[in-house]
Image (spheres, coloured by chain):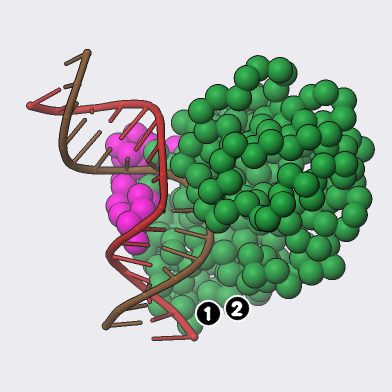
Chain colours: A green, B red, C brown
Amino acid sequence: MPELPEVETVRRGLARRLVGRRFAAVTVRQRRLRRPLPPRFAERLVGRRVEAVGRRAKYLLVELDDGQVLLVHLGMSGRLFIDGATAPGAHDHVVFVLDDGSRLTYHDARRFGLMALVRRDRLAAHPLLAGLGPEPLAADFTAPVLAAALAGRRTPIKAALLDQRVVAGLGNIYVAEALHRAGISPRRLAGSVGGARAANLLAAIKDVLAEAIAAGGSSLRDYVQATGELGYFQANFRVYDREGRPCPACAAPVRRLVQSGRSTFYCGRCQR
DNA sequence: AGACGTACCTGACCGC
DNA sequence: TGCGGTCAGGTACGTC
């Protein structure tokens, strides 16, 4: 799925196209996503004007003129794209028609995504958002904050960084890339990442996310930007999905291991 | 409390 | 060409 850089790329694309527009019609073709769409979903959206498109972690926050926020999570295979008048195809679950005649389609083969409607003043307390850790690119996400979140945890650092309560927005790809940049083994216990290591890791997280956003995100097998174009950060992966190929830093072959059921790519020489 | 396995769902890909 | 097995960017839940 889209991780933070991909969601941020979609957010920027949506903001350009949606802000100031009204929903003229909303068609639900499949309401069973990870959770069912809210009751009266289409009725609650039609006629509403979009005031802003924000983001928290991997959630898109479409702010509406009646104080509601349309919250969208893309799961692993969710896409949002503006298209013309083509007929909806397989896995096009929701079609939003805008007042300028353009259409926004939500497409999600695996249906691990979700949408919710939340009052803006209740957003922070909403169960989907309340437990999220700091935004990794925010100024107040600092090395001491990261070190404190990791302190005492006996789980591998790989698993800790995937935990959205520690830091919100990283997924399997960017965790692997950040750990490589920081020279930290994915197997190292989270609680042993403090001091200079935490500072290195913090910088690596911020750098890799910022670079990926600047590149328009990554595009694996089913991720496309809001505009339909492909991001190209995947060309810059140093370890992710590069098993057996040389580490860009030391040329040792990139290795793969499985941690809590998920692939981890790393350099056994650079990462300790 | 925290860590682990499993479930959700479909498609792509690989080897036979 | 078809079939079965494996894997995929995420999260939530049950169990220990």
Magenta segment, prevailing SS (helix, strand or loop): loop
Q: Which residues are magenta?
A: A242-264
**Quarter containing the C terminus of chain A:** bottom left
Camera-side residue of A255 and A257: A257
Measuring 84% from the left and 68% from the top, which residue is drawn there? Answer: A121
Measuring 60% from the left and 25% from the top, which residue is drawn there? Answer: A88
> For residue A6, which quarter of the picture?
top right
Q: Is residue A48 magenta?
A: no
Q: Chain of mark 1?
A: A
Q: Is residue C13 left or right of residue A107?
A: left
Give the amino acid type for the residue marked by disc 2 in the picture: Ala
> For residue A140, which quarter of the picture?
bottom right
Q: Which element type, helix, strand or loop, lies under badge 1?
A: loop
Q: Is residue A17 left or right of residue A159?
A: right
Measuring 58% from the left and 46% from the top, which residue is drawn there? Answer: A31
Q: Position of residue A236 (x, y in %)?
A: 53, 34
Note whether residue A206 is visible: no
Q: Position of residue A241 (x, y in %)?
A: 39, 38
Measuring 87% from the left and 45% from the top, which residue is drawn there? Answer: A48
Camera-side residue of A55 and A197: A55
Vertical comparison of A41 with A247: above or below: below
Residue denoted by label 2: A148
Q: Are marks 2 and 1 in contact (CB under 8 Å)?
A: yes
Residue denoted by label 1: A151
Mark 1 is surrounded, within 10 Å at the Cα level, by few (under 14), some (14 to 19) or many (20 or more) other residues, namely: some
